[in-house]
Amino acid sequence: MTATVPAQRTPTPLDLKSLRRDVDAALHQFLQGKTAAAAARNLPDQAARTLEEFLSAGGKRLRPVLCALGWQAATGTPPPKPVVRVAASLEMFHAFRLIHDDIIDDRAARRGAPTVHRTLATRHTAHHPEPLAERLGSSCALLIGSLALTWSDEILHTAGLTSSQLLAVLPVLDVMHTEVIYGEYLDVTATGHPTVDLDRALAIVRYKTAKYTCERPLHIGAVLGGARPSLLRELTGYAQPLGEAFQLRDDLLGVFGDPKATGRSRLEDLRAGKHTMLLTLALRDASPAHAAVLRRLIGNPHLTEADATQIRNILTVTGARAHVEGMIHERRERVLRQLGTAHAIHPEAQDALRRLAEATTRRTT
């Protein structure tokens, strides 16, 4: 008698568009409640309204998506509502990060619209002289960003997790919060005087972006699903090179990207003198004449488009641009090899993780 071989079940992919809608709905419901609560207590409701405007203006929702995929990598199932709410809390935390980051960098635009502090400053110009209006805009944005940080914790703690899930996830969140602030600190203290220190440039990439954007969101979803250490190790092997490639692509787009697609200026990183891998490699490999031009122009707050064109030409002729593209390619290949040899990542999540890696490393926005 011939044994019947059970048919292999085709993995069911996670509906990422639906997930993003669910995350947005959770954020909308939460902020609507905060707006109503503020009005009922005669408190300013501008904070919740401003946050909702900011969150609805766009964004990739990458961290919530990776949180959900971390859950699926552990369980093989779509995330339940409590996990979706945890994913939404990561997007609220990201709002805090972006609002504060834009104040630190004095960024004028994000996602094709004025940054929060610039928007608030414009509103204050009707009643105050410009210097005071700008200070009020930054101060109010700082407070709204701080509220986003507080509210991200509230969303997490009211998500409906079990006590064991909460106990497992809080240490991962603590590590993520610490790492990203250290990454920001490294970035701020290196801005304005980029050097040929490749290790410093890579440390900024790892702590400000790679761990915060990819590794910890995956870990958060996975530990909620009861992940074993073997799964967390495999997710780290996937996430660290992916996060580095994501930031390297972001650095290229910040200088060479289309502002209509990216929603940001191509001058801001150059004017600030960001210590990116792109500029570090160019300074290392430039001729003395080209290095002198870079040091004269990078970090100039009055940098013109003509100046930026000079810099872009040098970034190209030194090979820095091609080198960074090569680094992105190498990391993408490492990610795909990791998925090809993974044993602990549930098959249901592997295809989505593969497609996400391709999309985030080849993106133009």
Image: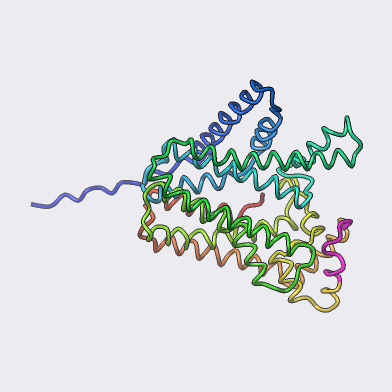
Q: Is residue 244 above or below residue 93?
A: below
Front-most of residues 358 and 59: 59
Task: Point out residue 272 in the picture as x, y percentages from the top left corner.
Answer: 80, 58
Q: Is residue 329 above or below residue 135?
A: below
Q: Is residue 19 above or below residue 39?
A: below
Q: Is residue 67 left or right of residue 294?
A: left
Quarter of the image holding residue 54?
Answer: top right
Quarter of the image holding residue 154?
Answer: top right
298 part of magenta stretch: yes
Numbered range of the magenta stretch: 293-303
Front-most of residues 79 and 157: 157
Task: Point out residue 180 in the picture as x, y percentages from the top left corner.
Answer: 61, 55
Front-most of residues 287 and 64: 64
Residue at the farthest right position: 129
Task: Point out residue 64 in the picture as x, y percentages from the top left corner.
Answer: 53, 44
Front-most of residues 6 and 225: 225
In the rendered view, how is the structure colored? Answer: rainbow
59 part of magenta stretch: no
Quarter of the image holding residue 143?
Answer: top right
Residue at the farthest bottom position: 288
